[in-house]
Every structure is written in structure tokens, then in C-alpha cells.
């Protein structure tokens, strides 16, 4: 099993959910009828579809994890396709909730957001979570990581709506940096099949006041995230914070990302991070 966390600190952000949900509700109340039908960077979804998805996933998580209401799901096995299952559930949820009027959708989102925030704050962050983060290569995850993953969902879908409707983004260090930190825990799993000599170091810089530096070190049998290293990087990749979230959520194509990223050193080492996906898709 790959370890996405390496020796980095846990991402403890359950207390931040109200700070991200409140601006979302305010934003949705501002939208005119035409804006609800604006296309987002997600090819299949318009603004209303994204809002419907945000409601569906919170209600689904509360029902399944908090309340133990488990729908009939296919058993895991050699032919089990998690991404296909998640995509199907997402599409079914969107199909139901986009039928609602915007006022009803917003009212339900307010309630679901409060209950979801309460639920995440109630969890022991270091207990085993109900679901592992497959995109980070985990077979078992801790609640802190699942909560951080949930936070990235809330952040990046709200950002999609803001981008589509021309509203200011929510790129503040308090809210966006934890999202980036969570996304980049996918690095060891993403690089798992890339061979390199022991001691090879990749440095990833997310440029901007919400960003930072992440280091990926090749050990004898795996890649591992490290907080610091005296080793000079074999490759340094700098990605503007404006497009980093879009790279990791399939919101920008590889060619466009390459034109805005800066690579120094071994370019082969840079390739996986520029197409890394940190969501189930």
C-alpha cells in the first residue's frame, strides 16, 4: 500500500467547513436564471448540476456513514470498477436534484451543509474512515484525510461555479492551501510506476500566496513525500496556483497546463504531476 502522507502533518480542517459553505450559499442566492444554466469546466455539468451534486454528496455521506443506511452496491471483486460506480451515483444524484427550483435547492443545501459540518467535527480524526482515498493509493484512510478530501470537493466545485459565472474565487491561504496539500498527497501513488534511482528528489512548487513546496523522494522500493530534504532536486516543477486545482480535478487539458507550468531539470520526472488526478473520476 502506498503512503500518501509520508512524514507530512495531518490536515486537520473540520472546523473550516462553515467558512466554505457560507460563501457558497451567498453565491447561489446571487445567481440569475441564466447563470444557473452556465456551462462549467466540467464538460457534463452546468452550474445547477454542480450545485445538485454538492447537495447529493452531502446527503449521501450523512445517510451512509453517519446513519448506516447502506444502499445495495455491487460487491468488490476483480471486475469492480470504483470510478464507474461513483460516476453512476453522481449522475443519478444530479438527475434528481437538478429538478428542484433554485430556492428549494439552496434551502436543502443550507441544512445539509450544517449537518455535514457537525458530523465531520464529531469524528475522531485519527480513527479509520469509512472509505479509503483510492486516488492516493490508500487501502485504509484516517478520518482526517477523508475530511480533507471532502473539503477539497466542496472547495473545487464551488470554484467551478465561481469560474463559470465570473465571480471572484475563494483562493485564500486559509481555504485553498489545505486543498492543495490534500491533492498533493496523491503524488506517491501517481509516481508509483515511474522508476528512478534511490535518492532522486522531485520538488513541486505551487506559486502564489496559497501555495507552497512539496518534495517527493525516491526510496529503495517506493516514492515518499518528505517535509524537507538536503538533496538537490533532479527536477523542479512550478505551477501557478490559479491552475493547480484545475490540473488535479481534470479541469484543464494537459497541453494548456504545460504552457503555464515551469520545469527545471529532468522533464520526464515532471510529466506525472502535470496530469495527476486527485479525485475519483
Image: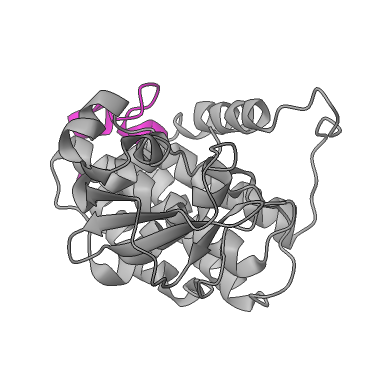
For the point 42% across and 71% down, which residue is it?
229
Q: Position of residue 224 (x, y in %)?
A: 55, 59
The answer to whether any part of residue 111 appears in the image is no
The answer to whether any part of residue 62 appears in the image is yes
| Residue 60 falls left or right of residue 52 | right
Q: Where, by quadrant of the figure, is residue 227 drawn?
A: bottom left
Q: Is residue 43 above or below residue 137?
A: above
Q: Where, by quadrant of the figure, is residue 124 drawn?
A: bottom right
For the point 38% across and 61% down, which residue is it?
214
The colour mode here is: one colour
Q: Main secondary structure of the magenta part?
A: loop
Q: Is residue 123 above or below residue 266?
A: below
Q: Where, by quadrant of the figure, is residue 118 drawn?
A: bottom right
Task: Give the magenta-colored segment's residue range.
Answer: 30-49
For the point 42% across and 44% down, which residue is it?
105
Q: How many numbered discs, if any?
A: 0
Q: Nearer the viewer, residue 248 or 39?
A: 248
Q: Nearer the viewer, residue 251 or 30?
A: 251
Q: Nearer the viewer, residue 231 or 129?
A: 231
Q: Is residue 232 above or below residue 281?
A: below
| Residue 3 falls left or right of residue 160 | right
Q: Is residue 208 above or below residue 186?
A: below
Q: Position of residue 172 (x, y in %)?
A: 23, 66
Residue 223: say if magenta: no
Q: Position of residue 5 (x, y in %)?
A: 56, 64
Q: Position of residue 203 (x, y in %)?
A: 35, 56
Residue 35: say if magenta: yes
Amino acid at each position: 500500500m502506498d503512503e500518501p502522507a509520508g512524514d507530512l502533518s495531518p490536515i486537520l480542517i473540520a472546523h473550516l467547513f462553515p467558512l466554505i459553505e457560507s460563501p457558497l450559499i451567498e453565491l447561489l442566492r446571487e445567481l440569475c436564471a441564466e447563470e444557473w444554466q452556465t456551462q462549467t469546466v466540467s464538460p457534463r455539468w452546468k452550474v445547477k448540476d454542480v450545485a445538485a451534486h454538492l447537495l447529493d454528496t452531502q446527503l449521501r455521506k450523512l445517510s451512509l456513514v453517519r446513519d448506516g443506511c447502506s444502499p445495495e452496491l455491487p460487491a468488490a471483486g476483480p471486475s469492480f470498477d470504483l470510478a464507474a460506480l461513483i460516476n453512476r451515483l453522481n449522475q443519478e444524484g444530479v438527475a434528481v436534484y437538478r429538478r428542484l427550483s433554485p430556492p428549494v435547492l439552496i434551502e436543502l443545501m443550507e441544512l445539509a451543509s450544517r449537518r455535514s459540518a457537525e458530523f465531520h467535527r464529531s469524528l475522531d480524526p485519527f480513527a479509520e474512515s469509512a472509505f479509503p482515498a483510492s486516488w492516493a493509493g490508500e487501502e485504509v484512510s484516517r478520518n482526517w484525510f477523508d475530511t480533507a478530501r471532502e473539503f477539497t470537493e466542496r472547495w473545487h466545485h464551488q470554484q467551478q461555479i465561481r469560474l463559470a459565472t465570473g465571480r471572484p474565487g475563494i483562493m485564500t491561504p486559509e481555504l485553498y492551501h489545505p486543498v492543495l496539500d490534500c491533492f498533493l498527497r496523491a503524488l506517491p501513488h501517481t509516481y508509483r510506476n515511474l522508476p528512478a534511482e534511490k535518492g532522486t528528489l522531485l520538488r513541486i512548487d505551487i506559486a502564489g500566496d496559497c501555495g507552497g513546496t512539496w518534495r517527493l523522494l525516491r526510496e529503495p522500493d517506493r516514492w515518499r513525500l518528505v517535509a524537507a530534504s538536503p538533496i538537490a532536486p533532479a527536477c523542479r516543477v512550478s505551477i501557478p496556483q490559479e491552475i493547480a486545482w484545475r490540473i488535479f480535478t481534470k479541469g484543464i487539458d494537459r497541453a494548456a497546463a504545460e504552457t503555464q507550468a515551469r520545469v527545471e531539470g529532468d522533464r520526464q520526472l515532471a510529466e506525472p504531476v502535470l496530469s495527476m488526478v486527485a479525485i475519483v473520476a
